[in-house]
Amino acid sequence: MRRSADPACVACRAQPTTRTGHTLNTRRQFIQGTVAPLALSALGPALAAHAFDSALKPAPTGPGLLVSQRPPVAQRKFVSAAVEQTIVAAKARIADPETAWLFENCFPNTLDTTVTTRVVEGRPDTYVITGDIDAMWLRDSAAQVWPYLPLMKQDAALQSMIAGVVNRQARCVLLDPYANAFYDNPDKVSYHKDDLPKMKPGVHERKWEVDSLCYVIRLAHGYWKQGGDVTCFDAQWLEAMKLIVATFRNQQRKTGDGDYKFKHKTMWPSDTAAGSGTGHPVAPVGLIASVFRPSDDGTVFPFLIPSNYFAANSLRQLGAMVRALYRDPAFPADCLSLAAEVERALQKHAVIEHKTHGRILAYEVDGYGSHYLIDDSNVPSLISMAYPGAIGVNDPLYRSTRKFLFNAANQPYYVKGRAAEGTSGPHAGRDMIWPMGIIIRAMTTNDDAEIKRCLKMLAATHAGTGFMHEAFHKDDPAKFTRKWFAWANTLYGEMILRLLESKPHLLG
């Protein structure tokens, strides 16, 4: 997923068109046999060793050779009895051996490889890295632990781990509500250290993305609805929630450009903010400006429609939650008022009339009348809005938009190749399909044939690794980015569990 290249990294400089972190570049190039020994050794002994360890050969996938790709039990970062029981029970219900193997590898990947737990000031604290980059994205970390929420009641340690994510995210928001990623160690120096304005200690990257704060609310609300211990919803958490709402209001930009500014020295225009660092101009119509997308690429028009739908839905969840927990009518009313304002603006500005498909949703607008008709594979996207419940899967507007977007004649980032078809994007390149988009497609349709097609494509494009990746080439899945991308792995596991519940005949 969407990581900017480190200019200090030899591997990144050697391949400037690969817009990912240095561990990924090394890992990806080594798998494909393109990293010279000199370049690898220049990365330093520890990183070179890590690259060698991570550059696994494709796992054997012949009959009887589907060997687990999970770390040995003693090396796993977190072990949940409830998750292990779920894996065993689910595999017994999946007829296809390769699909069962992918589920076993992918579903626990967040717990196996990315979670660090501790107690801070008597409260659980959990740091969750995204995979091959040692930083905690608000979006990724919330999404990575999301599928484990229903299992908390069976596993107190699992509940405490997720409570630790809720606690950690509240502190991150209070540190900087405009930042998208953070470090565990405040003394660690980011390779974005030259970005302007200067980042606070503990911040890895400061790209303003509306959905980052939405995910913080979504996880807290999901944890609460699943019966999680409410002690994590203390005064600090409430302060963070109020800052989220204030940040949303600031970025409606009704009286100017708002507080956010960002400048980044880069070879890629989409990696920095346009204009004076605030993004392209918008009209004050009630929508919330997002200077960057969930892919960490800059927006063309800052009113990112999927993120505004997500924000309206999240604000309603937050209002209901605070009303129940605090019995304070003022702040919930503020949440619901802002949600209603965003929804009215979406009705007025997000819908366009297409000459062939009729009423559909734009991906981005500026409030002045301009719109951009694409989609992105990250979440939220237009297709994925039905996944968090921001729009109904049978909503006519959603259905017409979906029909438009899954047509290569309409959508420049919908591509078809010899290996698969799906949504790509500017982040990894037009020919690079994201498994996450295929997974979300399967999770937002009731069409059995469409779901089967998605399952087959996912099984055919993991390149023998047993895991999902950020993106793979439409004609050659062996050309992929991010061998260790925990969110995509966990999302695959969530898809399988949902299908076992709603459409078991497709897997049995």
Image: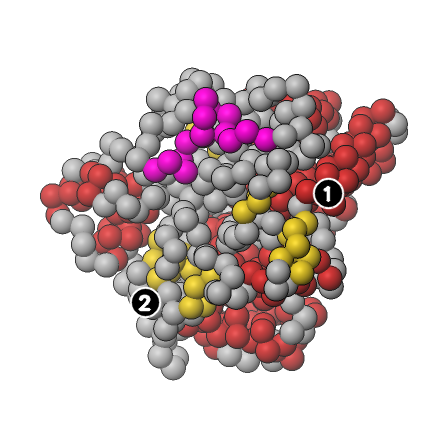
In this picture, which residue range is highlighted in magenta? 268-282
Instruction: Tell me: residue 86, above or below residue 18.
Output: below
- Frontmost residue, 1 versus 343: 343
Which residue type does callout 2 highlight?
A: Asp
Amino acid type for the residue under numbered disc 1: Lys
Residue 49 among those drawn in magenta = no
Q: Residue at x 33, y 32 (%)?
A: 266
User: Where is residue 301, by image quadrant?
Assistant: top right
As drawn, is 430 to the left or to the right of 446? left
Give the label on residue 476, or none: 2
SS for callout 1: helix
Q: Quadrant of residue 174?
A: top right
Residue under label 1, please give it. Answer: 348
In the displayed structure image, the side of residue 278 where residue 321 appears, left or right: right
**Mark earlier in primary sequence (1, 2):** 1
Q: Is residue 501 above or below residue 29?
A: below
Main secondary-structure element of the magenta-colored stretch? loop
Q: Are marks 1 and 2 in contact (CB under 8 Å)?
A: no
